[in-house]
Image (cartoon, rainbow, N blue to C red):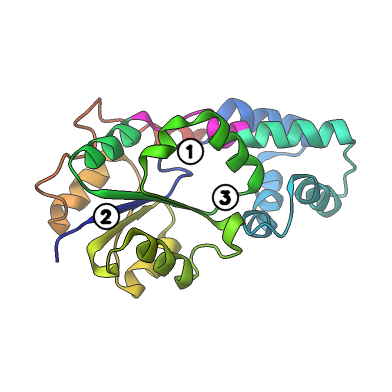
């Protein structure tokens, strides 16, 4: 069946983590990178599900780390966490999404997303309006890799699972989508994505990633810094 819709993850697909904001988070906590990353992701799913808000998430982080944050520090942590996920967009991937939209394909963003980042995105990113569907975990109380969130996305797009392509940086999320019946690719950089599209014979008659600008493995470089 032909692909009628492309579903994008947001974090580390349409954006790259901003290393400057990440360094400020480390400085605010006083932790080394390994300890920070371990605690950062421990309760991130509850944040993305909307179980925790920003102050609650960072209070839990502090308790797990044996730290104590003032209200001003928590405000700064939330601010820099938001900047981590909004300060460095992956412009070539956004250009590709726009090219697919211009070519007549349906597009969606399906993202595990906390409320504070989402609030800023809605305020600052007018390009979100060009996507046919925007699916955010914190608003639904379900998150990838729960099969329900993939099914809901395709239902809202009005396409069968077999006619949608899902792109995500995490293999766990890609595998869950494939198991459900979507076409799915793990995103590790634009050159790799182009190779995988060619190997799978997907979207051959549509614009390819990187055609609207320089092929950029910036995500890989930035992730190696973090």
Can you tell which mark lies on residue 199?
Answer: none
Give how far across and how far down residue 172 sits, in percent: 44, 64
Give how far across and how far down residue 117 sits, in percent: 61, 40
Disc 1 designates what residue?
223
In magenta stretch: residue 84? yes
Tell which circle, 3 or 2, labels the residue nearer the N-terminal end.
2
Give how far across and how far down residue 126 sits, in percent: 45, 31
Disc 2 designates what residue?
5
Tell which circle, 3 or 1, labels the residue nearer the N-terminal end.
3
How many numbered discs? 3
Q: CA distance from mark 3 to mark 1?
A: 19 Å
Q: CA distance from mark 1 to mark 2?
A: 28 Å
Secondary element type, mark 2: strand
Disc 3 designates what residue?
113
Secondary element type, mark 1: helix
Secondary element type, mark 3: loop
**Residue bounds of the magenta highlight:** 83-91
Labelled pair 1, 2 in contact (Cβ < 8 Å): no
Q: Residue at x 19, y 45 (%)?
A: 104
Number of the front mark, 3 or 2 = 2
Q: Residue at x 86, y 52 (%)?
A: 63
Give how far across and how far down residue 221 sits, in percent: 42, 33
């Amino acid at each position: 069946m032909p692909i009628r819709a492309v579903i994008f993850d947001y974090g580390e697909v349409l954006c790259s983590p901003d290393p400057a904001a990440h360094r400020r988070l480390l400085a605010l906590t006083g932790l080394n990178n390994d300890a920070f990353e371990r605690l950062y992701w421990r309760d991130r799913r509850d944040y993305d599900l909307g179980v925790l808000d920003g102050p609650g998430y960072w209070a839990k982080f502090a308790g797990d780390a044996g730290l104590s944050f003032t209200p001003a520090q928590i405000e700064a942590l939330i601010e820099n966490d938001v900047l981590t996920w909004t300060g460095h967009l992956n412009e070539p991937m956004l250009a590709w999404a726009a090219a697919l939209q211009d070519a007549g394909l349906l597009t969606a963003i399906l993202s595990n997303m906390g409320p504070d980042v989402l609030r800023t995105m809605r305020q600052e990113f007018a390009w979100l309006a060009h996507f046919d569907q925007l699916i955010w975990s914190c608003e639904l109380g379900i998150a990838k890799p729960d099969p329900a969130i993939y099914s809901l996305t395709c239902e809202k797009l009005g396409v069968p699972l077999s006619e949608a392509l899902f792109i995500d940086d995490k293999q766990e999320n890609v595998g869950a989508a494939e198991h459900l019946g979507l076409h799915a690719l793990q995103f590790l950089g634009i050159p790799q994505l182009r190779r995988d599209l060619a190997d799978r014979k997907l979207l051959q008659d549509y614009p390819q990633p990187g055609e609207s600008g320089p092929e950029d493995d910036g995500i890989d470089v930035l992730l190696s810094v973090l």
